Image (tube, rainbow, N blue to C red):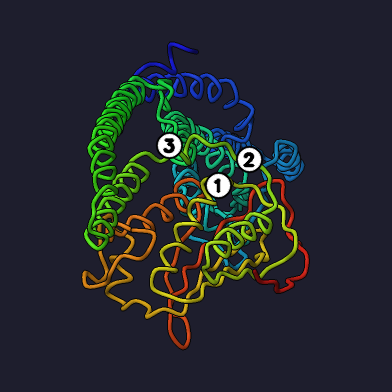
Amino acid sequence: MRNFRRASIQSQILILATFLVVLVSVVATAMEPYIYGRHDRGFQNGLFAARAEMVAEQFAQTSSEQDEVAVLKRAAALGVEVEKLSLDRPLAGKRQMVSPRELVARINTMLADNIFAAFHRFAIGQSHPDVLTVGIDDKRALVFQLPVFPSYVWFVPAAASGFLKIVIPLVLLAYFSSWLITEPLRHFAAAAKRASMEGSWEQPFEPDGASEIRSLAESLNVMSNRIRSMAEDRTRMLSGVGHDLRTPLTRLRMRAERSGEPELRSLMLADIATLSFMIDECLAFFKDASTAEADRKVDISSLLQTIATDFSDMGIDVSFTGPRRLAFICKPQALTRAITNLVDNASRYAKQVEIDLQESDDGGIKISVGDNGPGLTDEAKAKVLEPFFKVDKSRQIGAKGGSGLGLGLPIAKGIVTKAHNGQLTLLDRKPTGLVVVIDLPAPQGIQPGGSPSIPSSH
């Protein structure tokens, strides 16, 4: 069985089709006598024609009415319905009379049928039996009632035989062939989804199934290894560049602090802080630590309240609205970083920032970070989530520095979409401002139903 599953798809289908043909042939050969049995139509028609011919010959040899009655009784015992007809009676309702020599041929012709006529009679039912008048001599004739051969004993066995020989093999072949092909592909899809959610690309595809599927799995594993290696080399290179840049920046900061001109010293320290912030933000974007963090159950309300408190301690007006307690499974450090980036980005262009938490009906959560700043145009909303996009080059960087490269929102989006399989949306806030809405799906094991929403602020 293992060798069969590891064969090529073409070989699997060929072997399966051959096996099914052999199996169906054996079953059909064994079951056909039971399906048809003694209800073979051709045999029954031929037997009736032979018996009718024998009855006509015996009746022609009779010389008395007693002999005629005896012949008719023997015919009835054989299942042949026949009656004597005197030629001095009218032939109303009777077909044209035939001679005994034409009896067998005429019976075969009248009883001849095909599958379409049989299906027609099977659908509407059989009408009255046909009769055949056979002239014995100048004064006597016999009227045979042709047998009503039930359609179901011909049509049903033929249909059952066709179903057994054609329909069932095709269904089995289609089912097993599709299973052999789609089962490894379903494993592929599950592995790809698991790898994208967990961020682990270390041999995600198991080389199992047909040879074509195994070859594809090996190719994808090689590709994922190369991508992981390139990403690690990029991160390692950027970390080295960042480390090398911090050394001269430290020397510049020390020299600037010894400057005797306060205004020049302030400008130089601001530029040095900007460069340091740019390095840290770029490294944070290229090295996403959220994928390595494990999911765990936390109080999401307490997490957001802590973020609001920390910014309030720095003199930034940040408030929180939401339930007092709400358990949720997430990557807390990564989510804290995402919300912090959003609040920090909003605080540069707004005086007030609001964090709102709501529980969805399906057990998920919705986090909104709104501000009263100038907001964004529709065109800017479509580009602001792209790395290194600057909304307004004329804006001055705030007290915390800020690179102006627009990495805060892309980092937050990556944490929401990749690490939590959620969605991040930018909306307008009335009358002015911007609202960043984060929708996180319901985690397994947490039932919906949180505490009532009670506003609180810091």
Count of numbered circles in the view? 3
* Residues at marks 3 and 1 touching, judged by CB atoms closer than 8 Å: no
Q: Residue at x 51, y 46 (%)?
A: 334
3 vs 2, front mark: 3
Q: Earlier in the sequence, mark 3 or mark 1?
A: 1
Image coordinates of residue 171 in percent, x first then y, are 49, 37
Q: Which mark is residue 192?
A: 3
Task: Find disc 2 in the rendering and name its residue.
Answer: 59
How far is mark 3 from mark 1, CA to CA?
88 Å
**How many neighbours does mark 1 have within 10 angstroms: few (below 14), some (14-19), or many (20 or more)?**
many
Most foreground residue, 452 or 247: 247
Q: Residue furthest bottom?
A: 431
Local secondary structure at mark 3: helix
Along the line of sight, the residue nearer the viewer: 56 or 49: 49
Image height of 4 relative to 205, above or below: above
The label nearer to you, 3 versus 1, is 3
Of residue 373 and residue 254, the one placed in the foreground of this image is 254
- Position of residue 390 in the picture relative to residue 322 (left or right): left
Q: Are marks 1 and 2 in contact (CB under 8 Å)?
A: yes
Question: Which element carries disc 1, helix, strand or loop?
Answer: loop
Q: Which mark is residue 445?
A: none
Which amino acid type is shown beneath numbered disc 2? Phe
Residue 321 in sight? yes
Residue type at mark 3 is Ala
- In this rendering, would 247 be left or right of 294? left
**Which residue in the protein does label 1 denote?**
136
Q: CA distance from mark 1 to mark 2?
A: 8 Å
- Residue 169 seen from this side: no
Helix, strand or loop at mark 2 = helix
Q: Residues within 10 Å of mark 2 (few under 14, many from 20)?
A: many
